[in-house]
Image: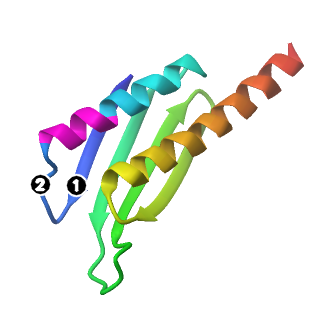
Amino acid sequence: MKVNVQSVNFNADQKLIDFIQRKLDRLENYYDKVIYADVFLKVQNTSAKDNKVTEILLSVPGDDIMVKKTCKKFEECVDECVSSLQRQLIKRKEKLSAHV
């Protein structure tokens, strides 16, 4: 799966990009028709500790799935986004197999 990582107003570390790639590659175990993923990393200028925002746009045939999470660390956000996407992909696969 092709993963595009865009960091807004900062440069993402290569370790973070590799971490995101590994996590998103695991999604193919649940649904193998994923085309690509766009990941947007942002830091909000607020005094709150939960100021890291991660958005993942997953492109699958016929639809796009968007997930957005706000956390203290980008790794935590990516974990939450991937688990949410995992649940959605499993539901999607079950719906498709019910129609066949």
Residue situated furthest top in the rendering: 100
Q: Horizontal and vertical percent for residue 95?
A: 81, 28
Q: Residue at x 41, y 36 (%)?
A: 37
Q: Are marks 2 and 1 in contact (CB under 8 Å)?
A: yes
Q: Does residue 39 lie above or below 62 as drawn?
A: below
**Which of the 4 image quadrants contains residue 83?**
top right
Residue 11, which numbered label?
2
Residue 7, which numbered label?
1
Judged by its main secondary structure, the magenta piece is helix
Q: From mark 2 to mark 1, how far is it between C-alphas?
A: 6 Å
**For residue 19: magenta?**
yes
Residue 92 can be seen in this image? yes
Nearer-the-camera pick, 66 or 53: 53
Q: Horizontal and vertical percent for residue 36?
A: 41, 30
Quadrant of the image for the N terminus? top left
Q: Residue at x 54, y 17 (%)?
A: 29
Nearer-the-camera pick, 24 or 48: 48
Q: Please tell me how crowded label 2 is: few (under 14), some (14-19), or many (20+) other residues with Cα within 10 Å.
A: few
Q: Horizontal and vertical percent for residue 9?
A: 16, 66
Start-end of magenta stretch: 14-20
Residue 38, which numbered label?
none
**For residue 72: magenta?**
no
Q: Amino acid at mark 2?
A: Asn
